[in-house]
Amino acid sequence: METHTVKPISGTWFEFQHHSKAEGKYWNPACQSFTEAQWREKISEISSTGMEYIVLMASAINSEAYYQSSIFPQATLSCENPLEVLLSQADSCGLKVFMSNGFYGDWREARKNITDKTVIHKSLTAMNELSEQFGHHKSLYGWYMPDETCIIRHFNKKFIDYVNLCCGEARRLNPNNKTLIAPYGTNLVKADTKYIRQLESMAVDYIAYQDEVGVKKTRVENSAGHYEKLKYAHDKAGRSTLWADIELFDFEGLVYRSALLPADFSRIKKQLEAVSPYVEKVLAYQYQGMMNEPGTAAFAGHPESETLYEDYMGWVKEKS
C-alpha cells in the first residue's frame, strides 16, 4: 500500500481513571494526582499531534462522577473539576469532545446497563446534567455511549433500542449533537441483509469498530478483510459513517488481567494500513498511557510511551 494513502490517527479515547486497576497500572496513579495545569498540558499535547477528537470513556465510574451530580458523589482527584478543565482546554485547542453517558451501572455489566430501567434513568439524567453544566462549551461535539455489547454476527436488538433512545435524548438536548458508538465483535460481523437493515435502523452518526488487535481477537493480517466487509454493509445501508478504533496497546501478561503497554509502532502502522482504505476516520485507544511527548510535565504511562510517541510523530512528519 502507498504510504500516502494511510490515514493518521484523528482522535483518541480519554479518561480520568482507567476502569481496570490492573490495566491502568502505569498511568492511573499519575492521573489521580494530575493538577489542573497537568491536565491542560496533556490535552494540548494530544492536540499538537494533529488529532481533532477526544472521546471521553466515562463521565462516571465505580459510583463516582467526574462532575457535580445528583446521581453519585464526585470522584476525589487532585484536579477539582476535571470535566470543566477538559472542555475548556479543548475549546482553546479547537478539539471536538464526545461526552460519555456512562458508566451509571457496573461497567462490567453492559447487557444489564442497556436494559435496566434504573441504570438507563441515571444515564439519561446524567446527559441532562452534563448538558446543563457544560453545554455552553464549543468543544462539546456530541455523545459517546460506552456500554457496548458484542456483535455476534448481528447487533443485539436491545442494544439498538438503547442506542436509539440515547441518540434521541442527545438530539433533544441539542439538535446539532453527534453520536458515537465503538462496538466490539468486529471479527464476528456477518455483513448480510439483516446486518444492513440493522444499520439502517440505527440513529447513531458514527460507528468506530474496535480492530481488536491489542486484545488478540484479530491478527493484523486479517484486519483489512473485516473492515472491507463492514464497508460493504455500510455502503449498502447508506448511513452510520464507518470509522475505526485501533488498539495501541499490548498486555504485560494475561489479556484483560495485566497492565497495558505501548505496542511497537511497526505493528500500529500495519493496523493503520489495514483499516485506512475502508474508513473515513481512524480513532485510537488510546493516547493516554500509551504515548507521552518527551519532557512533558504531564507524564502518565510506561517509559516506552515516549518511544511510541516519537515513532508515531516521526511517521506523521514523514507523510506530510
Image: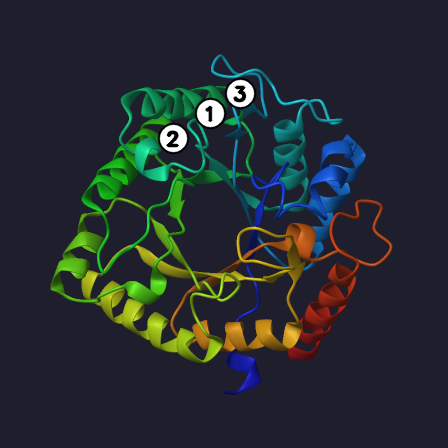
Question: What residue would you read off at disc 3?
Answer: 133
Left or right of 176 on screen, residue 78 = right
In the displayed orientation, state which residue is furthest to the bottom: 1
Residue in the foreground of this view, choosing between 106 and 319: 106
Measured in 3D between alpha carbons, the distance from the residue under mark 2 to the one under mark 1, in whole angstroms, is 9 Å
Regarding residue 159, the answer to whether it shows in the image is: yes
Left or right of 17 on screen, residue 122 = left
Please say if the residues under marks 3 and 1 sit with CB atoms less than 8 Å apart. yes
Measured in 3D between alpha carbons, the distance from the residue under mark 3 to the one under mark 1, in whole angstroms, is 6 Å
| Figure check: 8 above or below 210 | below
| Amino acid type indicated by mark 2 | Asn
- The residue at 22%/66% (across/down) is 190
Viewer-side label of 3, 2: 3
Question: What residue would you read off at disc 1?
Answer: 131
| Figure check: 289 above or below 87 | below
- The residue at 27%/36% (across/down) is 162
